[in-house]
Image (tube, rainbow, N blue to C red):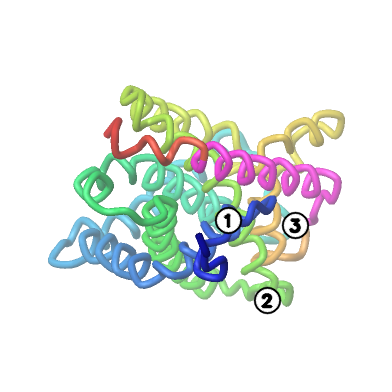
Amino acid sequence: MNVNRQAMPTLVLEAGRSDRQYWRALWHYRELFFILAWRDVSVRYRQTVIGIAWAVLRPFLTMVVFTLIFGKLAKLPSDGDAPYALLVFAGMLPWYLVSTVLSETSASIVGNANLIDKVYFPRLIVPLATIVVALVDFGVSLAILFGLMLWYGFAPAGQVVLLPLFVFLALLAGVGPALWIAALNVKYRDFRYVVPFMLQVGIYASPVGFSTAAVPEQWRLLYSLNPVVGVIDGFRWCLLGGGSQLYMPGLALSVCVAGFFAWWGVRQFRRTERSFADLI
C-alpha cells in the first residue's frame, strides 16, 4: 500500500516550545487584555464619587496621620530639606501602587469566574489587566504629590526622569506575590483574608512614614529584604533628591528579591492555571 508521507503530520518535540507558544498566545489575546482593563477602570470610576475620592483621600489622609505621628510626635528627621509631609507622600506613592496591585490581582481569578469556566485564553491576562487600575490610581496620587510640592515650593529633582524605572520595580514587587496568591485563592478561598492582613502589617514594616536613614546601619541590608524598601528609597531619591540618597546594596537586594518573587509567581500561576476552570 502506498502512503503519501508528505500528507502525514509531523510532531516536533522541542524544549521550551510550549512556553513560546504560551507567550505568543498572550500577545494574540492582547485585545482581551485591553477590554478587561478598560472594564475594570470603568467599574471603578464611572458614575461613582467614591472611586475618584478614594484615590485622593486614602493617600492624603494617611499622609496626615503619619506626619503627625512620626514627624510631630516621634520627631523623626526628614531627608535633607524636604518637608516631612512630602517625605511621607513620596513613600505612600509606591506603597499604594504595590498594595493595589496585590489586592486587585490576588482576587482577579475568582472575581472573573464566569469568564474563566466558559472560554479558553491565557489566564495570565486576567490578573495583568487589573494592574491598569493600580496605575490609574497611581497617576491620581502622583498629581496630588506634584500639587503638594508646588504648595511647599519644592521643585522635583533632576533624576525624576528615572521614576518610570522605579514604577516598574514597584509593579514587579507587587505582581509576583499577587499571582501566587491568585492561584492559591482559587483552591483555598480563605486566602482572601490573608491579603488585607499582609497589607495592614506591610505599611508599618515598610519605610512609609519615616526615612530608611533612621534604620541602624547594621540592619539596613537585612531590612532591604522587603523589596518595597528599595522601591520607596528610589521614589524619594527621584522626587525629592537632596538628602534622599540611595543605599545601593539595599536597592540591589530589593531588586533581586522582587525579581525572584515575580519569577516564582508566574511559575506557580502557570503550573496551576489549567485547573482553574475545574476548581472555580
Secondary structure beneath label 2? helix
Which badge, 3 or 2, comes first in the chain's sequence?
A: 2
Q: Which residues are magenta?
A: 245-270
Residue with the most extreme left position: 47
Front-most of 214 and 13?
Answer: 13
Up-down relation of residue 237 to residue 221 (above or below): below
- Mark 2 vs mark 1: which is more N-terminal? 1
Three-letter amino acid code of the residue under disc 1? Leu
Left of 25 or right of it: where is 185? Answer: left
Identify which residue is drawn at 36% across, 56% down: 121
Of all residues, the one furthest to the front in this rendering is 1
Q: Residues within 10 Å of mark 3 (few under 14, many from 20)?
A: many
Q: CA distance from mark 2 to mark 1?
A: 50 Å
Q: Amino acid at mark 2?
A: Val
Give the residue at mark 2.
Answer: 161
Which residue position holds label 1? Answer: 11
Residue 249 in the image: state x and y as whole percent: 85, 45
Q: Answer yes or no: do the residues labelled 2 and 1 have beta carbons within 8 Å?
A: no
Image: 155 above or below 228 = below
Q: Nearer the viewer, mark 2 or mark 1?
A: 1
Q: Which mark is residue 244?
A: 3
